[in-house]
Amino acid sequence: MNYQEFLNDVQTQLSFRLGSSASLKLQTILKNNGTHHDGLIISRPGVNISPTIYLTPYYHRYLDGVNMEDIYTDILTTYQRHLPQTDFDITSFTDYRKAAGRIVMRLVNYEKNQQLLKEVPHFRYLDFAIIFYCLLHTDEQNQANILIYHKHLHFWNIDTDTLYQAACINTPLLLPYHMENIREIIQKLPAEESGEPEFPSLPMYVLSNHTNLYGASVILYDGLLQQISEHFGKDLILLPSSIHEVLILPADGVEDFSPYQAIVRDVNETQLSDDEILSDHVYYFSKADGILTLQK
């Protein structure tokens, strides 16, 4: 069956299985880098928050030969795992005094998100945009959050600077950074995944937050890059491997960045989905100046 037939089939079959205990709606949602994802929203009577399950990955599994009964079961299991047990206290978002402590920031590509940036408060930083969310829940597998739009600032009666100040305080506290040598990460992988790794000739580190979700924003944490640079006693080369993390290499000075640029572009083209790409560029942090610059 084609993709549209797949969507209709999933909605019909899950409606039958869930019966009157839930209502199902298909909705196309604008995501990162201008991508659109088809989400299945499952609502229950008496509960004012609903999980959204994105169906495109399930269609790819269907094309790979997974039977539909297994797909229905997997979707229902995912739904049950993320099912809210009680009503969401809407005032924890609508009342800024309650929401202020959960405002966090995220990095996205500026040029690839022009449609989204018309609707949300943001700041430009290098070739990135800093956007804002209200973090409702986070663990090592998922995050529940609400993207903040201009309309939210209106009813909160605040400006973007106030939002940014809150995010600068909250994000490092709620989503603390984590850095690990890439050799150690590879060594932890099962043998069938790691194979016989060829380790980089230079020390390389993965920098993210403790959940590894949308962790590239840790480069915005006040003083963090300077702290890392001081630790190594060197400048830093940053490779944006995805919206979830960046790779860091200690550097002895300005170098030829073209090999690193080739690595970033190759990863973006061959390893990432369109909505995971952060940038095609390489960045350099000067220990002496405390400044991050884009290298072309």
Image (spheres, rainbow, N blue to C red):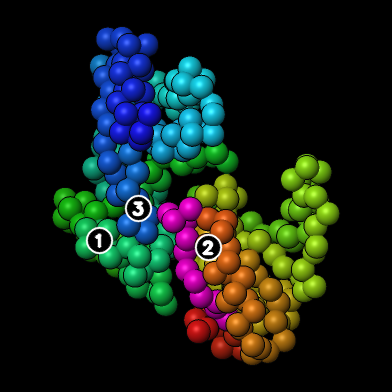
Q: Amino acid at mark 3?
A: Thr
On the image, numbered disc 1 is attached to which residue?
115
Mark closer to the chain start, 2 or 3 = 3
* In the image, residue 41 above or below residue 207: above
Look at the numbered discs 2 and 3 and tell me whether their residues touch, using CB distance below 8 Å. no
Mark 3 or 1: the one toward you: 3
Q: Residues within 10 Å of mark 3 (few under 14, many from 20)?
A: few
Give me the C-alpha separation between circle 3 and circle 1: 10 Å
At a point 43% along the width and 54% down the height, the residue shown is: 275
Q: Amino acid at mark 2?
A: Asn
Label 3 sits on a secondary structure element that is: loop
Give me the C-alpha separation between circle 2 and circle 3: 15 Å
Look at the numbered discs 1 and 2 and tell me whether their residues touch, using CB distance below 8 Å. no
Q: Residues within 10 Å of mark 2 (few under 14, many from 20)?
A: many
Label of residue 268 in the image: 2
At a point 21% along the width and 51% down the height, the residue shown is: 152
At a point 83% along the width and 54% down the height, the residue shown is: 196
Q: Can residue 236 be seen from the camera position used here?
A: yes
Mark closer to the chain start, 1 or 2 = 1
With 248 as the anchor, is 202 left or right in this view?
right
Residue 56: give x, y in percent of width and height.
41, 38
Residue 38: give x, y in percent of width and height.
33, 39
Residue 251: give x, y in percent of width and height.
70, 82
**Residue 237, quarter of the rendered image:** bottom right
Stretch of the chain drawn in magenta: 273-285
Q: Amino acid at mark 1?
A: Gln
Residue at the far front: name it: 1
With 68 as the anchor, is 194 left or right in this view?
right
On the image, numbered disc 3 is attached to which residue?
35
**Residue 113, quarter of the rendered image:** bottom left
